[in-house]
Image (cartoon, coloured by chain):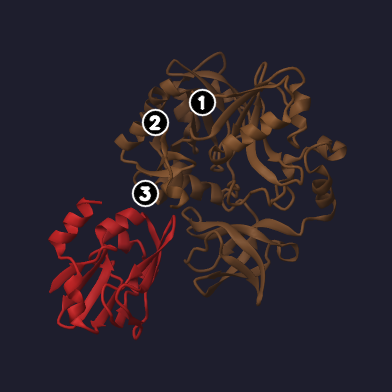
Chain colours: A red, B brown
């Protein structure tokens, strides 16, 4: 399993042609208390760099973008009852959705963990 | 470049906030703390204990001179003449068509009126006052002054412990103020605030404010609270925010602030926009500011449109997740026929219609202390 990161602070954990997507610890800290998450239902086609989910903190609504294109296989139902999982476990139980990759080559432009840490340190 | 990218001046407690882990954001032209540990935790702490807010961005003014009360009654719809020493009132700066230029608090000092106006519009307020008050009136903008608010059910206990002076702090009830010392620092303290809780607003010299803030935060009941929780607390308290829920396109009747127009002024008129405002008082306004309870968990925010069936009947002016209510709430203007409590409407968020019911405000009961002792 390999995890990649985007400049918009999403992570994508890939195993074969399946992947899990969420937002990073940096992103959840910037957002503050998450009170609502809207995840795409299974079957939704998402496109790389386009809105795929919405996260609402106390202060504001923010879009979450698909790191790569694909078909959603599952939205994280646990976030409906407990959206604060995004704050407490952003890279674990607070995942947003799983998808089947349309084109694994799209992963090539993403950052690995070391590159993402350096990117965040420069913000 | 958005408004948020503009120059943000530091306030007197800038480093104090940063050293306590605040995330600073530009607001009203200043760098201000949006949050420390998190908005919900800070909100809840204030409702249960006491929160210290730095509101030094607000404009603190004094007005003095011959004929002051008459002069102020020409620009405000308040009964200034009946205001006793140490008493405080809420009022509105109105334009000639009855539009709200700002909302404000004013208090009677021995030889002056002390006024606190919103930070984001204080420059315009001062210009308006200077243009509309006679030359005999002196307006001083107290730029060397800081303002703190200590709010919450334990605010009295915390503040009383560090306050000395000619009077005991318990002489103050809601909307009264007086001179005290906090840790030896001269302070004007009023029992007032913007959270719906019991609490105090504290005006001190800017070069002494760090000492006062340190002393207050050393009390076990007190934590510093950011602007984020200030907004969620005031929304639950049903209190409007200028620039969002109030502006020059709203008048006191549609804004449901008729309590700010005293009985005598209603009878006599003679304030800006009196013709329109008195007409609306008698006949009702075409739109009204109301509160909404929203079904589900998805917040409706400023700008969301309000519908009755297919017809748009209003717009949300403030909204968000309410930590104490534990649900989304909103405030907005709707056409008068839909403004009655219990009126069932829909608010559109990202193409979805949320069921919303017009609800009396406040959403969380006020806990003001209206009689002497706490």
Q: Residues within 10 Å of mark 3 (few under 14, many from 20)?
A: many
As drawn, is A84 to the left or to the right of B335?
left
Q: Is residue B264 visible?
A: yes
Determine which of the numbered discs, if any, sits on residue B38 in the image. Answer: 3
Q: Chain of mark 3?
A: B
Q: Which mark is residue B10?
A: none
Label 3 to label 2: alpha-carbon separation: 19 Å
Q: Secondary structure at mark 1?
A: loop
Q: Are marks 3 and 1 on the same chain?
A: yes
Question: Which numbered disc covers residue B143?
Answer: 1
Q: Earlier in the sequence, mark 3 or mark 1?
A: 3
Disc 3, disc 1: CB below 8 Å?
no
Q: Is residue B105 visible?
A: no
Quadrant for residue B216, please give it.
top left
Residue A76 place in picture, x, y as percent: 32, 74
Identify which residue, B284 or B217, lies in the foreground.
Answer: B284
On screen, B172 above or below B258? above
Q: Is residue B122 above or below residue B97?
A: above
**Dot 2 corresponds to which residue?**
B13
Please report whichever mark, 2 or 1, sits nearer to the chain's N-terminal start.
2
Earlier along the polypeptide chain: callout 3 or callout 2?
A: 2
């Amino acid at each position: 399993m390999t995890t990649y990161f985007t400049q918009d602070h999403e992570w994508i954990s890939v195993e074969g042609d399946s992947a899990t997507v969420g937002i990073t610890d940096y992103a959840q800290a910037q957002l503050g208390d998450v009170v609502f998450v809207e995840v795409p239902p299974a079957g939704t086609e998402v496109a790389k760099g386009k809105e795929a989910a919405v996260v609402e903190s106390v202060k504001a609504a923010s879009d979450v973008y698909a790191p790569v294109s694909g078909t959603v296989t599952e939205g994280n139902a646990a976030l409906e009852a407990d959206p604060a999982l995004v704050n407490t476990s952003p890279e674990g139980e607070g995942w947003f959705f799983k998808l089947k990759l349309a084109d694994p080559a799209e992963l090539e432009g993403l950052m690995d963990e070391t590159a993402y840490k350096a990117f965040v340190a420069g913000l | 470049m958005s408004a948020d990218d503009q120059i943000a001046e530091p306030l007197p407690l800038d480093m104090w906030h940063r050293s306590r882990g605040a995330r600073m954001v530009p607001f009203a032209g200043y760098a201000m703390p949006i949050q420390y540990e998190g908005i919900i935790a800070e909100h809840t702490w204030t409702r249960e204990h006491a929160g210290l807010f730095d509101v030094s961005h607000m404009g603190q003014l004094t007005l003095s001179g011959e004929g002051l009360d008459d002069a102020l009654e020409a620009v405000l719809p308040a009964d200034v003449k009946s205001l006793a020493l140490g008493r405080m009132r809420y009022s509105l700066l109105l334009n000639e068509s009855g539009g709200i230029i700002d909302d404000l608090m004013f208090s009677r000092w021995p030889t002056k009126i002390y006024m606190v106006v919103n930070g984001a519009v204080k420059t315009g307020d001062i210009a308006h006052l200077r243009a509309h008050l006679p030359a005999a009136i002196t307006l001083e903008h107290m730029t060397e002054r800081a303002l703190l608010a200590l709010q919450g059910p334990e605010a009295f206990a915390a503040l009383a412990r560090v306050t000395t002076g000619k009077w005991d702090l318990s002489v103050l009830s809601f909307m009264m103020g007086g001179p005290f010392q906090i840790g030896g620092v001269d302070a004007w303290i009023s029992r007032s605030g913007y959270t719906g809780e019991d609490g105090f607003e504290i005006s001190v010299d800017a070069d002494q404010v760090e000492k006062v803030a340190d002393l207050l935060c050393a009390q076990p009941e007190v934590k510093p609270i950011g602007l984020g929780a200030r907004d969620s607390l005031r929304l639950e308290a049903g209190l409007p925010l200028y620039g969002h829920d109030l502006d020059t396109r709203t008048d006191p009747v549609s804004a449901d602030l008729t309590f700010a127009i005293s009985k005598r002024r209603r009878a006599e008129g003679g304030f800006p926009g009196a013709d329109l405002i008195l007409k609306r008082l008698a006949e009702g306004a075409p739109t009204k500011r109301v509160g909404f309870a929203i079904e589900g968990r998805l917040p409706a925010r400023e700008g969301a449109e309000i519908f009755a069936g297919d017809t748009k009947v209003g717009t949300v002016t403030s909204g968000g997740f309410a930590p104490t209510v534990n649900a989304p709430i909103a405030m907005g203007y709707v056409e008068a026929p839909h403004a009655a409590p219990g009126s069932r409407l829909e608010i559109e968020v990202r193409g979805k219609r949320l069921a919303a019911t017009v609800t009396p405000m406040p959403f969380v009961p006020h806990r003001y202390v209206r009689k002497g002792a706490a």
